[in-house]
Image (cartoon, rainbow, N blue to C red):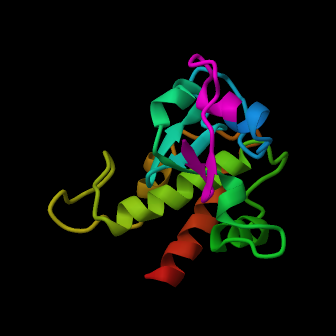
Amino acid sequence: MISVNGTPQRLPDDPRTSLLDFLRQHIGLTGTKKGCDHGQCGACTVIVNGIRINSCLTLAAMHDGDEVTTIEGLGTPDRPSDLQKAFLEHDGFQCGYCTPGQICSATAMLQEIANDWPSDASEDLEGPPQLTGEEIRERMSGNLCRCGAYANIVAAIREVAEKSA
């Protein structure tokens, strides 16, 4: 069994099924997108046990007992998450294809910062990371946006981080 957005799901019979295909084709959660299918674009980013991963690079069978959170588990149209609201307010998307992966990645990234995990852009490895634009861009570098809405994405993430600080 695997828990997806708090709901137990039976793992697929075929052990070769990727987590991405399991989410989209087996249980109908189509918010997670198939972009490159090689782990290079981040459109398929989901959160597994609090850690963001590219769901196209892992098999569903590898996550027996894990908790998976997709964009559908972060908020709804009636009750969006703070990041979803900020993406709307800052126009952090254009075509919207990468947006679910961006928001899942940003959600986990903010938790990484709260946990004081440094990145390659962190100036000080001993103290808490500073939420600079460079820090956000480094941490979000695995999520590509073909439309180039990066400045707006960074602004949305920064707003949410500052509100929760």
Q: Nearer the viewer, residue 70 or 61?
A: 61
Q: Which of the 4 image quadrants contains residue 154?
A: bottom right
In percent of width and height, residue 6 lies at 60, 59
Residue 17 located within the stretch drawn in magenta: yes
Q: Is residue 130 visible?
A: no
Residue 116 located within the stretch drawn in magenta: no
The C terminus sits in image quarter:
bottom left
Q: Is residue 29 above or below residue 13?
A: below
Residue occupying the point 61% across, 25% down: 18
Residue occupying the point 64% across, 22% down: 13
Q: Which of the 4 image quadrants contains residue 76?
A: bottom right
In percent of width and height, residue 127 lies at 19, 67
Q: Nearer the viewer, residue 70 or 90?
A: 70
Question: Which portion, as a residue range, is magenta?
Answer: 1-22
The N terminus sits in image quarter:
top right
In percent of width and height, residue 84 lies at 71, 66
Q: Is residue 136 above or below residue 131?
A: above
Q: Is residue 141 visible?
A: yes
Q: Is residue 68 above or below residue 78?
A: above
Q: Is residue 43 above or below residue 165?
A: above
Residue 54 located left or right of residue 70? left
Q: Which of the 4 image quadrants contains residue 26?
A: top right
- Marker count (numbered): 0
Residue occupying the point 80% across, 41% down: 28
In percent of width and height, residue 75 lies at 71, 67
Residue occupying the point 64% across, 37% down: 44
